[in-house]
Amino acid sequence: MSDPHKPLRVGIAGLGTVGAGTLSLLRQNATIITARAGRPVTVTAVSARDRTRDRGLSTEGLTWHEDPVSLARDPDVDVLIEVIGGSDGPAAAAVRAAITVGKPVVTANKALLALHGAELARLAEDHRVPLAFEAAVAGGIPAIKALREGLAANEIRSVSGILNGTCNYILTVMREQRRDFDDVLADAQKLGYAEADPSFDIDGVDAAHKLAILGALAFGQPVDFPALHVEGIRRISALDIAFAGELGMRIKLLGIASRHADGVSMRVHPALVPEREEIAQVDGVFNAVVAEGDFVGRVMLMGRGAGAGPTASAVVADLIDIARGRLTPIWGAEGDALTPLPILPMEAHHGAYYLRLMVLDRPGVMAEVTAVLRDTGVSLQSMLQHGRAPGEAVPIVLVTHETTEAAMMKAVAQIAALSSVLEPPALIRIGAT
Ligand code: NDP
Ligand code: HSE
């Protein structure tokens, strides 16, 4: 690393979707990368589990390490790229090993950063090495650079967006092709979008990892994953997607971090968004990151949030910074300048709600439901019901005016307990803020 003209020698830990994509990109775009990095960027060694697996590219001439920690310590490796995944285990061990011997690290591993990002940043600061993670949030979108560098002069009031390509792909295809959830999830896995454990995607955990990272950068606080409120898309049905359409809205899995007078709110959950809003039109594997700064106003970035090419693009951008010797504080400021802020509980959220019930089609049912809303202080804005099925189950949709989460939860618990309500109610928050 000391001679800025020598090739930068790279070790890649993990040769799956992202690792193989990175190796291909470095080979295919070698000429422009050399120009932009000011020197060649050369992969010298790799690590993965299965040596015999066909990865669609040649690993001839590269040193193969069974153990990613030994890759990190290889004297022919100047920089470690960690694209194994997982918050602990071999990925974390390799990252710690590289930093400890003074080697820069590039990682796409949001789970690792969300859970151990504060400790790893301290370790990297102590060893004066970069720990770069552009690929960890929103795939190919340069969201980290934008927030940490491009918007560095601003007090960031909120950062939000569509942060999981798998979920956005599933919700889009369910809406456009009227297909079932499980069937579309299998497609997203085949396309290389989903995590090794896809429940991380569909239960909102992956989006929450990314939001924890964005929230730390935006608000200058240590990354605090356990403080987030997290809900996924498992319970979103084709019926709700269709009703949302009738209401002129789309269902998106959103991550929203916002600063308030008494603390910050950080939450991931499905939301109904009016279809005329830009974020509602971000479809398929595309992600969007929206930041609000006090001087810049609103900034929206959109691009592919998962997949080999977009993610490799972000990994290699970090490598070029490292080759050039650019060093930015890992979380936007040094560790001792970061201040934990109070995290507001979800019960304090204020907004409008979509509530879909399956009820017995008999006289008086609506009166029972609206009596609960009256008693809990929740005001109704509109209602949808189609057709008749006397004595059988029919769906009804209620849209509320703005209320508190605490009041809405109380109302839903009481409505769910009514004998005429046949299934657990589907409750979805409305709005992208
Ligand atoms: P894959 O599951 O496709 O690849 C993981 C790779 O790690 C495989 O090559 C696997 O080896 C290797 N590996 C697993 N365990 C070990 C071990 N103990 N020692 C050495 N190698 C090991 O994952 P992805 O490429 O999809 O994801 C990698 C990382 O990038 C994750 O952190 C993910 O969250 C992140 N990411 C992924 C994106 C995507 O679109 N896929 C986008 C942005 C970030 P083998 O091939 O032999 O099984
Ligand atoms: N599984 C993630 C997604 C990969 O679907 O968005 C990109 O981080």
Image (spheres, grey):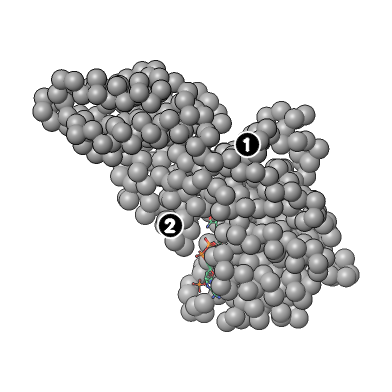
The tag earlier along the polypeptide, 2 or 1, is 2
Mark 2: secondary structure: loop
| Count of labels in the image | 2
- Residue 81 position, x and y percent, is 66, 66
Name, please, the residue furthest toward the left: 391
Please give left or right for residue 432 compared with residue 320 in the image: left
Name the residue rendered at 47%, 75% in the picture.
53
- Residue 368 sits above or below residue 267 on the image: above
Please give left or right for residue 20 compared with residue 402 in the image: right
Residue labelled with disc 2: 198
Residue 64 seen: no
Which mark lies nearer to you, 2 or 1?
1
Which residue occupies the foreground of this view, 33 or 408? 408
Location of ligand 1 given as a quarter of the image = bottom right
Label annotation for residue 41: none
Please give left or right for residue 217 compared with residue 304 in the image: right
- Residue 250 position, x and y percent, is 43, 31
Name the residue rendered at 38%, 19% in the picture.
380
Mark 1: secondary structure: strand
Graded by Cα atoms within 10 Å as few (under 14), some (14 to 19) or many (20 or more), the crowding at tag 1 reads many
Q: Give the distance between the C-alpha atoms of the residues marked 2 and 1, in whole angstroms.
A: 27 Å
**Which quarter of the rendering shows the N terminus?**
bottom right
- Residue 159 sits above or below residue 53 on the image: above
Residue labelled with disc 1: 258
Name, please, the residue furthest toward the top: 381
Name the residue rendered at 29%, 32% in the picture.
415
Q: Does the residue labelled 2 lie within 8 Å of ligand 2?
A: yes
